[in-house]
Image (cartoon, helix red, strand yellow):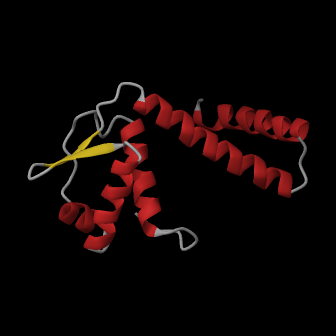
Amino acid sequence: MEYNTGAPIYLQVMNELKKRMVKGELKPGEKMPSSRELAVMYKVNQNTAARIYREMESAGYCFTKRGIGTFVSEEENMFENLKKEMAGELLANFMHEMRDLGFEKKDIIFQIEDYREDADHDDGM
């Protein structure tokens, strides 16, 4: 994983783990890597790995069983809510950037439709 210098590494790793949950790569109740394994996987300090799990646990994305490990949350609606939350953040950032470029809503919609039409021809979507 390549890190963006504009955001804290722990948030970037958390975001990556959340994406893996939403995509079904990390399933409800599945055991997650230990903090040590996480540190090695993402090439981060062990304290950073521990912080990632603390933050994720406080947000309800995972839970820890003392002496056993950290597990993906088993809450039924968590993944759908997480997917909507992440999509909302992406859209908010996109809209902010487009408006900073001087686009208005109708222009943004046109750009999306135009992009989609181009993509339909390029990659079979």
The reply, left or right, for residue 42 in relation to residue 98 is: left
| Residue sitting at x 76%, y 46% | 95
Quarter of the N terminus within the rendering: bottom left
| Residue sitting at x 55%, y 33% | 84
The reply, left or right, for residue 59 in relation to residue 66 is: right
- Which residue is at the far left? 67
- Which residue is at the far top? 76
Rendered image quadrant of residue 51:
bottom left
Residue 43's place in the image compared with 18, above or below, is: below
Q: Nearer the viewer, residue 22 or 10?
A: 10
Residue 111: image x %, image y %? 81, 40
Q: Nearer the viewer, residue 68 or 103?
A: 68
The reply, left or right, for residue 78 in relation to residue 64 is: right
Residue 31's place in the image compared with 3, above or below, is: above
| Residue sitting at x 55%, y 42% | 86
Residue 113: image x %, image y %? 78, 32
Residue 117's place in the image compared with 15, above or below, is: above
Quarter of the C terminus within the rendering: top right
| Residue sitting at x 28%, y 64% | 50
- Tally the numbered discs: 0
The reply, left or right, for residue 115 in relation to residue 75 is: right
Residue 94: image x %, image y %? 71, 48
Residue 22: image x %, image y %? 42, 37
